[in-house]
Image: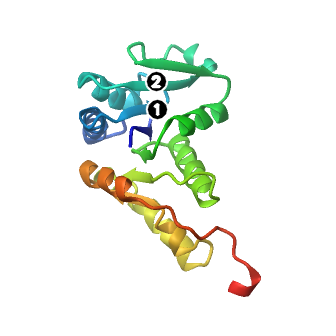
Amino acid sequence: MKSITVFCGSSFGSDEKYKKQATLLGQTLAKQNIQLIYGGANVGLMGAVADGVLSEGGKAIGVLPHFLQSKEIAHNHLTELILVESMHERKTKMNDLCDGVIALPGGYGTLEELFEMITWAQLGLHKKPIAILNVDGFYDNLIKLIQTMVDKGFLKQINREMLLVSDDIGELLEKMRKYKAPRIGKWIFKEEI
């Protein structure tokens, strides 16, 4: 993996450990010569992960819509800042630039980005590993909900297994390196029922 997109909150959350893990993830990516692709902001966990990368001499590429740059949240010390027109164009560009995705804690935007990427993978639009760094059990309830989707017949177990999860950065990166996309498609045909 040469580059990883990180989706995360534009705030720090209520516990210092979120910022610490975002910074540590950035530092780890830089030390492993993995380029960061992220939303381009200097605030919250977004800023922390970028600062972590830059503190270790790594490369950080931000992708930011023009309307957010005008709110003065763009990180000014990135390797590169790519400006786009829309949020959808932002996600498309981030997908084009990366070899995998990690979600840190965040809010609606983080979830939306994570689920769009995993949906694209489920539909076979890419074969990249999609991962959650489950800092202090932040995503435990979401993981339970996803298992409920499997249990209730709305998601195949093989598609559930596409989402890689760990609370340890090294372990998560190793899972991503070993990931093989499933060969089976999303759609269930009549003869499979």
Identify whether 140 is placed above or below 51: below
Q: Nearer the viewer, residue 87 or 9?
A: 87
Quadrant where the N terminus sits is top left
As drawn, the residue found furthest toward the right would be 190
* 6 with respect to 192 (left or right): left
- Amino acid beneath label 2: Ala
Residue 69 drawn at (x, y percent): 56, 16
Crowding near the residue tagged with mark 2, few <14, some 14–19, many ≥20 C-alpha atoms within 10 Å: many
Quadrant where the C terminus sits is bottom right
Residue 123 drawn at (x, y percent): 64, 59
- Residue 108 seen in the current view: yes
Q: Nearer the viewer, residue 8 or 126?
A: 126
Q: Residue at x 25, y 23 (%)?
A: 55
Which mark, by number, is residue 113? none
Q: Residue at x 38, y 14 (%)?
A: 77
Q: Nearer the viewer, residue 113 or 12?
A: 113
* 19 with respect to 183 (left or right): left
Crowding near the residue tagged with mark 1, few <14, some 14–19, many ≥20 C-alpha atoms within 10 Å: many
Residue 106 drawn at (x, y percent): 44, 42
| Res 76 quadrant in image | top left
Circle 2/circle 1 CB separation < 8 Å: no
- Residue 10 seen in the current view: no
Identify whether 27 is placed above or below 161: above
Identify whether 168 is placed above or below 85: below
| Res 79 quadrant in image | top left
The span from disc 2 to disc 1 (Cα, nearest Å) is 8 Å
- Amino acid beneath label 1: Tyr
Q: Residue at x 63, y 19 (%)?
A: 67
Which mark, by number, is residue 41? 2
Q: Residue at x 57, y 55 (%)?
A: 121
* 29 with respect to 68 (left or right): left
Which mark, by number, is residue 38? 1
